[in-house]
């Protein structure tokens, strides 16, 4: 009788607790919808140096997201390198709480890099948002990268809020820049917000516009989990932290999750919100932006743009737009001291944990010994990696001539990816080569158009379009080989336009090209690290200038050094570094001429023997000579 009573009591308790849970979950669903309506996910898009990091600082201060004790300039730029150069290298996300008209709002700001090298990261950050702040410098106006990012935002149907920054400067041209904004995105002139990141002007108007104009995220919290991975960072204690925006579904701490692209499965050890300091949570729902830590140790297993889903109840399809980031520029990195090779390998592996877009593989060079062939997103990315190797790991390295990736087709019909000139098949086996082409967009003042067009044509560019914009500015579009902008194109463009020209590009595919491998020979021995792939029309001029430059850089020896530029077996240019000679006839005072001739012949034989056994040491500057021929 007593057992039966307890059984009835337990059944009654379970049914009541189930009803309570059901009511609680129904309340939660309603609560979720209210919370979702009060979420705003937005990013900042701008050209380099238009003040987006400074403006982000003011937004963080206005919303009280950072205490005065923790505050420092450029809060979202972690690296000293970013602060010194005034550029954003890595995209960042931070959550701000803001009270507006009696309601509590959650604002998720996703900062983006401004440089063309990181355009894929920008595209993924934009895909995680519903709105964008378009920041324009009131003294410079619309730039090439601005146009590129605005079109990217429009493709994702983002609500764009134009902001005119640096209004406190005397050189500001608000009316002219407003004309440019109207032409670029349309809309009402009154909607353009005048602001200053330095003084804090217009910050409240920006926050009001974000809440009123940017739509709340759409998504079903009860659908299968579908989350976009828009960034990742490495934590030396906990592994890779993936930053996610949940499009649909719910993720709870301890859930088994799966990445679509890599098909790797993990447990969600910790999830949370991206405030100034990470805040762990038990649950993240549709519309939330947060992080997930799963003990992942390899950066390659978390790819930017990938989709995260639940292993037990997966979503039907991945979020569109994912692609593997492909390196555009390749260069060899070698330690100055051969004994530092293993240290360099460790340094590169640690760097790769923080920067998954860096690729490297071992290679050896007769001139430089053992090193690595590295792939970079662009020249700025290459420069940053070099700088970080020096600062963070104290590594002194030599970087070889940067080059792009070519496609070589053999007479047997095989296709070989060539990242290094030494990897090019022999001329007897080679059918043809294809090189990558880009579409370049340059905006400048009309005064400099002639010189800019001359520069692009010299770089084998073909003019595709020329548009005259308001305020005496011109936009020109060229199709040109990527290899031609790798060396000194950007520096020359800035020089001839006095810093006014802005430059943006994107790859459009490969085209057949008449290319040849130019080798540099020192005393008939090839220096593989100085080999380059170059267009045949430019080979003679380039080879001659290389020989002249190396003649200045290579120190004189006890014997003559022949510097030659060759294509295959054909020598196209030559310079000679004359020997340091001793006057062996100085001790002969008078006497027969045969005595002097005998001494000179003896010296000549010694020089010949020395040339056969002597090594020519190539100084470090010689490997950068190609970059500084002008």
Image (spheres, rainbow, N blue to C red):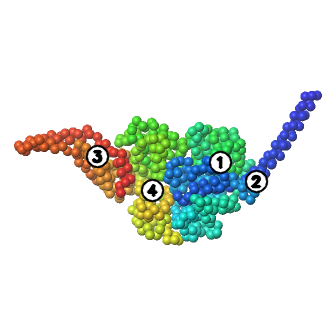
For label 1, the crowd category at 10 Å Cα-Cα, with few meaning under 14, some 14 to 19 and many 20 or more, is some
Q: Nearer the viewer, mark 2 or mark 4?
A: 2
Q: Which residue is under mark 2?
A: 34
Q: Which residue is under mark 4?
A: 482
What residue do we see at 41% from left, 56% from top?
A: 488
Image check: 202 left or right of 540? right
**Looking at the image, is mark 3 or mark 2 earlier in the sequence?**
2
Q: Which mark is residue 555?
A: 3
Along the line of sight, the residue nearer the viewer: 496 or 512:
496
- Is residue 318 something one can see in this rendering? no
Query: Disc 4 and disc 1: Cα gap in Å?
Result: 40 Å
Quadrant of the frame with the C terminus: bottom left
Q: Nearer the viewer, mark 4 or mark 3?
A: 3
Along the line of sight, the residue nearer the viewer: 259 or 502:
502
Q: Which residue is under mark 1?
A: 275
**Looking at the image, is mark 2 or mark 1 earlier in the sequence?**
2
Asked whether the residues under the numbered discs 4 and 1 touch, taking CB atoms below 8 Å apart as contact, a structural biologist would say no
Query: Disc 2 and disc 4: Cα gap in Å?
Result: 50 Å
Quadrant of the frame with the N terminus: top right
**Looking at the image, is mark 4 or mark 3 earlier in the sequence?**
4
Q: Say what secondary structure mark 2 lies in.
A: helix
Where residue 412 appears, as percent x and y from the top left, is 42, 48
**Looking at the image, is mark 3 or mark 1 earlier in the sequence?**
1
Where residue 427 appears, as percent x and y from the top left, is 36, 49
Query: Disc 3 and disc 1: Cα gap in Å?
Result: 58 Å
For label 2, the crowd category at 10 Å Cα-Cα, with few meaning under 14, some 14 to 19 and many 20 or more, is few
For label 3, the crowd category at 10 Å Cα-Cα, with few meaning under 14, some 14 to 19 and many 20 or more, is some
**Looking at the image, is mark 4 or mark 1 earlier in the sequence?**
1
């Amino acid at each position: 009788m007593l057992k039966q009573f307890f059984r009835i009591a337990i059944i009654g308790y379970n049914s009541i607790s189930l009803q309570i849970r059901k009511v609680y979950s129904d309340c939660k669903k309603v609560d979720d919808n209210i919370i979702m309506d009060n979420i705003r996910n937005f990013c900042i898009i701008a050209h380099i140096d238009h003040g987006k990091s400074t403006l982000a600082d003011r937004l963080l201060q206005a919303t009280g997201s950072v205490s005065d004790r923790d505050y420092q300039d450029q809060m979202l730029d972690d690296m000293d390198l970013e602060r010194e150069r005034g550029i954003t290298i890595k995209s960042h996300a931070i959550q701000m709480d803001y009270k507006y008209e009696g309601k509590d709002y959650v604002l998720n700001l996703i900062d983006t890099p401004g440089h063309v090298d990181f355009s894929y990261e920008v595209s993924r950050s934009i895909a995680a948002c519903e709105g964008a702040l378009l920041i324009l410098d009131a003294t410079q106006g619309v730039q090439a990268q601005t146009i590129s990012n605005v079109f990217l935002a429009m493709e994702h149907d983002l609500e764009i809020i134009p902001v005119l920054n640096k209004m406190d400067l005397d050189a500001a041209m608000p009316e002219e820049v407003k004309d440019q904004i109207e032409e670029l995105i349309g809309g009402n002139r009154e909607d353009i917000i005048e602001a200053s990141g330095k003084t804090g002007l217009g910050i409240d108007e920006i926050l009001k516009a974000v809440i009123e104009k940017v739509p709340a995220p759409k998504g079903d919290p009860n659908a299968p989990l579908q989350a976009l991975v828009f960034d990742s960072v490495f934590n030396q204690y906990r592994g890779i932290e993936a930053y996610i925006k949940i499009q649909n579904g719910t993720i709870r701490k301890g859930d088994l999750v799966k990445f679509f692209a890599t098909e790797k499965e993990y447990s969600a050890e910790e999830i949370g919100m991206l405030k100034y300091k990470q805040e762990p949570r038990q649950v993240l729902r549709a519309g939330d932006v947060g992080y997930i830590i799963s003990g992942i140790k390899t950066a390659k297993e978390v790819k930017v743009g990938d989709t995260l889903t639940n292993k037990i109840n997966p979503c039907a399809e991945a979020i569109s737009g994912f692609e593997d980031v492909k390196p555009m520029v390749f260069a060899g990195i070698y330690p100055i001291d051969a004994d530092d090779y293993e240290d360099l390998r460790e340094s590169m592996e640690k760097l790769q944990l923080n920067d998954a877009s860096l690729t490297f593989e071992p290679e050896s060079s007769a001139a430089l010994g053992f090193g690595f062939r590295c792939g970079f997103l662009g020249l700025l990315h290459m420069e940053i990696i070099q700088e970080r190797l020096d600062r963070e790991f104290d590594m002194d390295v030599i970087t070889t001539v940067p080059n792009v990736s070519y496609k070589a087709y053999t007479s047997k019909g095989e296709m070989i990816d060539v990242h290094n000139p030494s990897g090019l098949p022999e001329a007897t086996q080679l059918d043809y080569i294809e090189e990558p082409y880009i579409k370049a967009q340059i905006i400048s003042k009309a005064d400099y158009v002639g010189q800019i067009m001359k520069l692009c044509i010299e770089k084998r560019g073909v003019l595709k379009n020329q548009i005259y914009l308001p305020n005496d500015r011109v936009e020109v579009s060229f199709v040109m080989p990527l290899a031609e902008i790798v060396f000194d194109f950007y520096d020359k463009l800035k020089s001839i336009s006095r810093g006014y020209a802005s430059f943006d590009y994107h790859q459009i595919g490969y085209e057949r090209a008449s290319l040849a491998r130019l080798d540099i020979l020192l005393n008939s021995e090839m220096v593989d690290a100085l080999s380059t792939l170059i267009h045949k029309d430019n080979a003679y001029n380039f080879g001659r200038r290389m020989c002249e430059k190396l003649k200045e850089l290579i120190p004189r020896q006890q014997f003559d050094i022949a510097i030659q530029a060759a294509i295959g077996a054909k020598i196209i240019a030559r310079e000679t570094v004359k020997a340091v000679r001793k006057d062996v006839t100085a001790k002969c005072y008078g006497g027969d001429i045969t005595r002097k001739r005998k001494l000179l012949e003896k010296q000549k034989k010694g020089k010949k023997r020395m040339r056969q056994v002597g090594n020519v040491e190539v100084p470090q500057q010689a490997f950068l000579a190609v970059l500084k021929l002008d």
